[in-house]
Image (cartoon, rainbow, N blue to C red):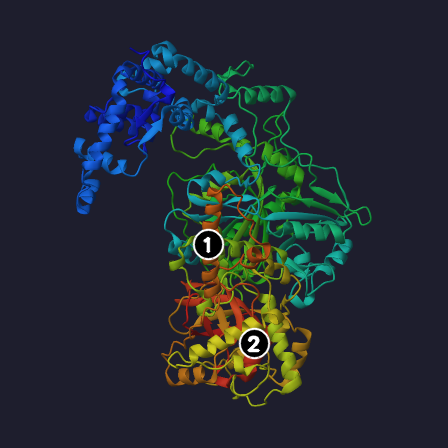
Amino acid sequence: MCEKLPPLCDLNLPCHSLKPFPLVLSLFTLVNSCSPSYLDALLRVYIRFISGLYLSLWASLIHSWMTLYFCYLCSFLNLLGDVRSEQQYQQKKFLHQSPGPPYRKEQNRGDSRGRGRGGWQGEHQNSSEEMPRYITVSTFAEARAAELKAMLKAVAQKSSNSLVFQTLPRSMRRRAMSHNIKRLPRRLQEIARKEAEKAVHQKKEQSKTKCRKARRRHINLVAEFNHRQRKNIWLETHIWHAKRFHMVKKWGYCLGNSPTEKCYRACYRAMTNHCLLQDLSYYCCLELTGKENELLKQLARICSVDAGLTFGAASCLSGRFQGSLNIYRADRYPEDMLGPVTFIWKPRSGSENRQLWIWVHPALKQDILNELKAIFQCSEPEEICIPEPITTLNQEEKQMDVVQNLGKKRKREDKEGDKAVPVKKIIGDGTRDPFQSYSWVSQTTGVVISDLTMEILRYRLIGPLSHSVLTETLKAASIQTEMVDSESKLNNWWVENCKDSEKVSLHHRQTAIFELLEGISSPSEMPPGTILGLTVGDPRVNLPKKKTKAMPDPEKYQDNDKVRQLYLEGVPVECAHSFIWDHDICKNVTENKISEQELNRMRAQLLVPGSQLDLGPRESKIPILLVQQPGKMAGEDRPGWGSGWDIYLPKGWGMAFWIPFIYRGVRVGGLQEASKHSEYQRIPHTPDDFPDCPAGMQFAKELECSLLDRFKRRPPAKRANYVKLGTLSPFICPWGQLVKSWEGRMKASEESVCPSPHAEHCTTEGRDFCDPKPELVKEASPEAGEAEDTMEVSSEDAMKTEGDTGTQDFGERGETMRSNFIVLRNEKLLMQLSAWCYPTSGKDRRPRLVSQLGGKEMTEDVLLPILMNYPRALVWVKLSLLRKGNPEIHAMICIPTEDDLLHLSKDRLFCGPQEPKHRDVFRHKVQKLKENKRKKKEEDNVKAQESNPPSVPEKETTEGCKDLILGLWSGTLPDVTSHCSRTLLGYVTRGDFSLATGCGEALGFVSLTGLLYMLYSQPADKKGLVLLRTPASLQYRFARLTIEV
């Protein structure tokens, strides 16, 4: 019967409903045309099959299905004998059948989804009119061969990260399949075996320290801590801070920024009423050793007498007092400032050589160290490294074995057994490279420069009761004349010094002065920078049972002649001596420290639990140095606020002193509290408020990047449009542009107009001193209708002239600031400026203060030499708001107009004028850039679909629009002084609501030329009044400008 049939390749088949489906469904339609419900069920399975839901389930059945379909085809070939007559019948049927109304077709087409059998029939009828009537099987199969190949490939590949047994239905899964391959079906066992082999090679090496007990062993902890502080050094109090503070990584250290608890006001109350503790051990100590004449000769080149005390000041040179100054590059004053430092001279001991400690901020250390090596010609480093604590060969071998076998059970095979103690390591000193030099010697002068960073610890106690905390925590060491053990090195240096009667007498005098500190009411009563050397016992011995608050003793506040003499004369020179200057003694004290474990064991053996432990001659003796911090010295209000004591310790004793201080009720502060401490003292903070030194420029760049990133992270609708607000540089202060603009105004005024002699002359009336462009400084009230047009014109004019007076973009402005300006630090000139800032008439005048500061009148003959000597100088100023307001960083300091001062004199409650809104001249550029990006993306998508490589964007367009951000000024800046309706004078570097004064206060810099121009033009009763405007606001607020010296 099959022999009568025509060949399959020549067979013409009706092609109803073949268009949307491949060969498989076409065969389904042919074979099962009499059973549409069966076809519908298979179609549903096929759709799920294509979507990937049952790929892995049907992967093994696809070949059997295809075989089955062709078997069905062959079995029904006997029915195809009459296929031609069937085709003729279908043709006649379609010819005599009317197509029906159009709405019927639409209804059938719309209802064909999910209607079962009737829906499929309607679909077939509509599609038969559009498709060819016959197909050839061989041609049709060749056309679908690629589809079948792609389908088989997709089935064979695994599209997920799941394992083989996870692809089975849940009813077929067994728990043993994850580790026993034979539990899987046979068809999947080979794939599972390959997966298992692949997992063995990719399996990560298991951690060697699984057990917590092994991880918490002391030697393993120290090894881990030293490994974690390779990049950022830990202080000895790091672990204590990490549990209670927000930690930040700065200047190569991991430091506590602010406490995790809410204690902002509590820290201020501690500084004002009790005591605040800070760990300043991250400050770097540079030691200079050599002849006094050689040291002073070269050090005089990096400082100036005009700026204050120098290294050769008599009070500091004797060793009685600590000094502070600003260091410049050699012979470059007042330019090329490096940063502020504090210094201490070791008291003379009869030798020609002197020792000098210079304490610098870690951000300034490298620049100052390089300059010191340059002036002393220390080119070759001295091969003296500060070694690790000495260990025996046997201890080193055992230590290496323990480190190599981390996590394994440790067997004590030594003779001591359970009493064996692992080798001590000082946390915070494990990062020093033993091959790096820390000492440099000069072959010509013999001066040795040593880096004692992390060798000397430094704590700071701030507050009026800091001396009470000191006297309660520390006790003077007892005299010891006999050794504890002939073999032990504990306190051997102290025993030798106690045999000298002069040193014993000196120790008694130092102890007496230290006990007198409890009778003073505040550390500010002591002479500024007083130094007291002392040797104390172990502070862990007299630790209180509970945390208490150190309070002064009223009985000791008597009219004592010794206390009065201490106020007037200070500490004698010989009492400033301390054994901490001797490196060998410090090393001995560090290495022979009694461990906490040994102390706790001794406490456990006491007969009366909780009684004080008496170590006797075994008690450690620690040399320390106490340095008084004077607190607020400039200005009239709150004199002595923030005074306290600095305590210097040998390394290794950090926590031994830290915990006893905590038990005396002190509050601990971090970097944020240190910044607030200097802000309330109104002194520059390092390195934030030193824009003319490299560290200050680096800080400004980092702050700009962080603020810009935060601005970009906000949604565009939530960002402030600084272009409309008239803020040219909201994230960085363009100091170079500011002083350059004021210098140009001064030169233009000299050529055109002379300054007016009348003091009542208005700042914006006519073309006055330093005012060559009055058309850009027009007044504009917010109610005036022409105000916005005025600002639009000025913005457009500024864009036209931006090439002449502009600065570079955000990332490049730091380079232009390097040599464009200086900060005025001449004390005589600052005192004269401070006197000129106070009103000479009215309620706010202060004649006594003005007479103390300086009596020169502000005349043209006095001003011109200052302007010629310092054309590009900045002045450190303090600003206090007259009314409400909270100044912020980068706020603008502007000069008020005549109408502003007149309005303020009529209405004392007048807050200040308002800046009119500016027009955003970059908005259309940003929108055009977005539109171009969108079109470019669409074109790239079209080309990608056409398999053409996307075109490379032009470099000019991308570079030109690189910094184009909506709301920020793009490209170079125009003239910053005349961009707004009020002339710009300077910027705020730190500002906030002051808890000390109860109003908003700000600190910043102003142009010296602009300040003299403002003071020369203002009325006598309005001297020193300025306007403040935050970057994200249009409101100006009145503030009083003062210079505190």
Q: Amino acid at mark 1?
A: Lys
Q: Secondary structure at mark 1?
A: helix
Mark carried by residue 848: none
Whether residue 390 is situated above or below residue 270 in the rendered picture: above
Above or below, comparing residue 21 to residue 907 in the picture? above
Compared across the picture, whether 232 is left or right of 4 comes to right
Residue 1011 numbered mark, or none: 2
Q: CA distance from mark 2 to mark 1?
A: 52 Å
- For mark 1, what is the residue? 935
Q: Position of residue 979 (x, y in %)?
A: 52, 74
Q: Which of these two is toward me, 951 or 34?
A: 34
* Quadrant of the rendered image containing residue 714: bottom left
Expressed as whole percent of the image width and height from the top left, the position of residue 1022 reads: 48, 82
Q: Secondary structure at mark 2?
A: helix
**Could you tell me if residue 54 is visible in this image?**
no
Whole-percent x, y for residue 167 in the image = 34, 21
First reached walking from the N terminus: tag 2 or tag 1: 1
